[in-house]
Image (tube, grey):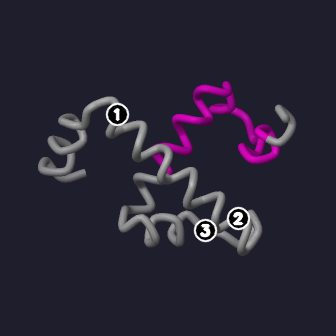
Amino acid sequence: MSTDKAEERANLTQPEKVNTREKILETAIELFSEKGFNGTTTKEIAELLQSSPRAIEFHRNNLRKKFGLTNTKTNLITHLLTLN
């Protein structure tokens, strides 16, 4: 990560961070409904958001941590579906 990007991220307010997370989720859900979960890539989500695939991975990894899935092979979507 470049210094400029790191500084930009550090300066985000909490509402901006939540907004980014919501945009990622909305975009992912839109693509999943169009192409299916297995037909959607991180790269496609990132391109629609004009972001980097790494930013999408960062948010996905945070979700995995929140659900205690960091050291398991459990699929995040499968886990989320079982919560419903």
61 displayed left or right of 79: left
In the rendered view, tell whether residue 72 sits above or below residue 77: above
In the rendered view, tell whether residue 15 sits above or below residue 20: above
User: Which amino acid type is shown beneath numbered disc 1?
Assistant: Pro
| Image marks 3 and 1: residues in contact by CB distance under 8 Å | no
Residue 50: where, in percent of width, then height?
Answer: 36, 68
Residue 65: where, in percent of width, then height?
Answer: 58, 29
User: Which amino acid type is shown beneath numbered disc 3?
Assistant: Thr
Q: Residue at x 55, y 61 (%)?
A: 27
Query: Is residue 82 shown in magenta?
Result: no
Residue that carries the numbered disc 3 in the rendered image: 41
Separation of disc 2 and disc 1 at Cα? 25 Å
For discs 2 and 1, the disc positioned in front in the rendered view:
1
Residue at disc 2, secondary structure = helix
Residue that carries the numbered disc 1 in the rendered image: 15
* Mark 2 or 1, nearer chain start: 1
Numbered label attached to residue 32: 2
In the rendered view, tell whether residue 33 sits above or below residue 57: below
Q: Residue at x 87, y 36 (%)?
A: 82
Separation of disc 2 and disc 3 at Cα? 10 Å
Residue at disc 1, secondary structure = helix
Query: Is residue 68 shown in magenta?
Result: yes
| Residues rendered magenta in the picture | 57-80
Residue 75: where, in percent of width, then height?
Answer: 76, 46
Q: Residue at x 71, y 73 (%)?
A: 34
* Mark 3 or 1, nearer chain start: 1
6 displayed left or right of 37: left
